[in-house]
Image (cartoon, helix red, strand yellow):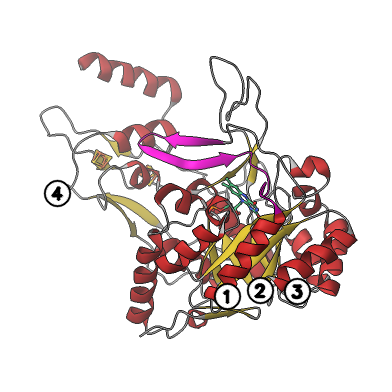
Amino acid sequence: MADLSINFAGIKAPNPFWLASAPPTNSGYQIMKAYEAGWGGAVWKTLGMPTINVSSRYGATNYRDTRMAGFSNIELISDRPLEDNLREMREVTKRFPNHATIASLMVDTRQEWNDIIKMVEDAGAAGIELNFGCPHGMCERGMGSAVGQDPVVLKTIVEWVMDAASIPVITKLSPNISHITDPGMAAVEAKTDAISLINTVKSIVGIDLDTYAPYPVVDGKGTNGGYCGPAVKPIALHMLKELKQHPQIKDTPVSGIGGIETWRDVVEYILLGATSVQVCTAAMHYGFGIVREMEAGLRKFMDERGYQTIYDFAGKALPNVTEWKHLNLEYSVKAKINEDKCVGCDLCYIACDDGAHQAIALPQEGQGRIPSIIEENCVGCNLCSLVCPVEGCITMERKDDGSKHRTWDERTQADNIPNTWNDDRAGGKGHYVPEPALALENKRKDRSKW
Ligand SMILES: Cc1cc2nc3c(=O)[nH]c(=O)nc-3n(C[C@H](O)[C@H](O)[C@H](O)COP(=O)(O)O)c2cc1C
Ligand code: SF4
Ligand code: SF4
């Protein structure tokens, strides 16, 4: 049976499922309740400079039937008195000594860092996380993402913290930057024990059409918020991969954060090299109980593949993430419609005709409702299979025999890449596209028949 316990940069936990620093970790009660539900760790809602919060604070992208596909907040760090937080932290760490109770911190001067580090160490914190990510409010005061966006300042503060701390330090990075490896490298040079990412993405989720103010509206005005939830997972996965493939950063443990909701999300993060994960939005949306599905799913995945610990498969996807120039140009797939599954909705036809390569034909009159693929036109882009509402109805079938492997890089080295405007070696040369005016006219005639 799989052993889910971890030792993350010296922080031990019964499993890799941690709550991220946010409202679900605002109090000792919530964290103890979460531990009883099965979470292995929790990063306490950030402690530091005194704040006042506004109401309202949250906004969301409700995409079609999915509520909170993306979530936004303009909340600051903890507005509770530090002494209350520390008292509760002491209680939590005493009662759950084997869980990873981590103190997230954000202060300003070196003296403040020294003081607050001592206080959370005395309260029994297993580690410290540095919040260099908050992209609203605190950054206007020179903290949060203002630090995360400036590798020089970030490095200086991490050095101060490493000098003062006697427990492991996790540097939490902001995604609001062009190259995540810049702050990643700064943190590593300052000898951080670990990195976590991502904090929230600077964003505006929408505009209220009555008040013309951005959501969440605060007395007729709004400000940029921090975006998170399922919508940001692809951004986070990419940034994780960037760190894990960087020669000087890759050996630093990373705690993955962003849009994690199910065991599958957890496995994907681990496959890209994360060795703990943190969850905020999903816990706010569905409550602490989601950890049960995560644990059962992760165990099943590991047992089925014979993995004893998460370290047996951590980073296993990294060798498969390469640069575009190393992809096999000879590999060829084409769409195939399963006629038994097709419901004749025509969504694939519309998508391919308007948005891709005119490679799907509608049935002739009296020939039923099922469209067909025009193989010679299909470039294997996947669009139809992505829009088809029936799971597994359009599949992509391999057409090359697998004997040839030729990449852009190899072609460049062989001096065999298209390099003039009308080069015969370019990919689209000779590929079918309709004669513009004639095809439009034919389409009009077809429509008039219906
Ligand atoms: C309402 C709210 C408050 C947050 N407060 C903090 C905070 O105090 N400190 C911090 O480091 N991150 C904070 N975060 C960011 C989360 O810890 C996390 O990095 C982010 O939400 C991405 O994870 P998710 O997609 O699971 O929500 C907050 C997020 C939300 C939604
Ligand atoms: S894979 Fe792309 S080109 Fe081929 S049929 Fe589907 S949408 Fe059209
Ligand atoms: S989108 Fe799928 S279900 Fe709809 S017509 Fe195309 S193949 Fe059939």
Earlier along the polypeptide chain: callout 4 or callout 1? 1
Q: Where is residue 406 in the image (x, y as percent from the top left)?
A: 54, 66
Q: Relative to 17, does residue 178 appear above or below in the rendering?
A: above
Task: Give the alpha-carbon distance from disc 2 to disc 4, as whole Å.
Answer: 61 Å
- Give the residue pinned by disc 4: 340
Badge nearest the viewer, 3 or 2? 2
Task: Give the alpha-carbon distance from disc 3 to disc 2, as whole Å.
Answer: 31 Å
Task: Give the alpha-carbon distance from disc 4 to disc 1, as whole Å.
Answer: 60 Å
Residue sitting at the far left: 366
Q: Find residue 248 and name its label.
A: 3
Q: Position of residue 349 (x, y in %)?
A: 31, 35
Task: Give the alpha-carbon distance from disc 1 to disc 3, as whole Å.
Answer: 37 Å
Q: Relative to 442, does residue 111 appear above or below in the rendering?
A: below
The reply to whether discs 1 and 2 touch (Cβ–Cβ < 8 Å) is: yes
- Specify the amino acid type for callout 2: Gly
- Give the residue pinned by disc 2: 124
Between 306 and 380, the one lying in front of the other is 306
- Graded by Cα atoms within 10 Å as few (under 14), some (14 to 19) or many (20 or more), the crowding at tag 3 reads some
| Residue 177 lies in the magenta stretch | no
Q: Relative to 117, does residue 306 appear above or below in the rendering?
A: below
Earlier along the polypeptide chain: callout 3 or callout 4? 3
Q: Is mark 4 within 8 Å of ligand 3?
A: no
Corner quadrant of residue 20: bottom right
State the SS at label 3.
Answer: loop
Q: Give the range drawn in magenta.
A: 58-81
- Specify the amino acid type for callout 4: Asp
State the SS at label 2.
Answer: loop
- Graded by Cα atoms within 10 Å as few (under 14), some (14 to 19) or many (20 or more), the crowding at tag 2 reads many
Earlier along the polypeptide chain: callout 2 or callout 4? 2
Residue 247 shows in this picture = yes
Residue 245 shows in this picture = no
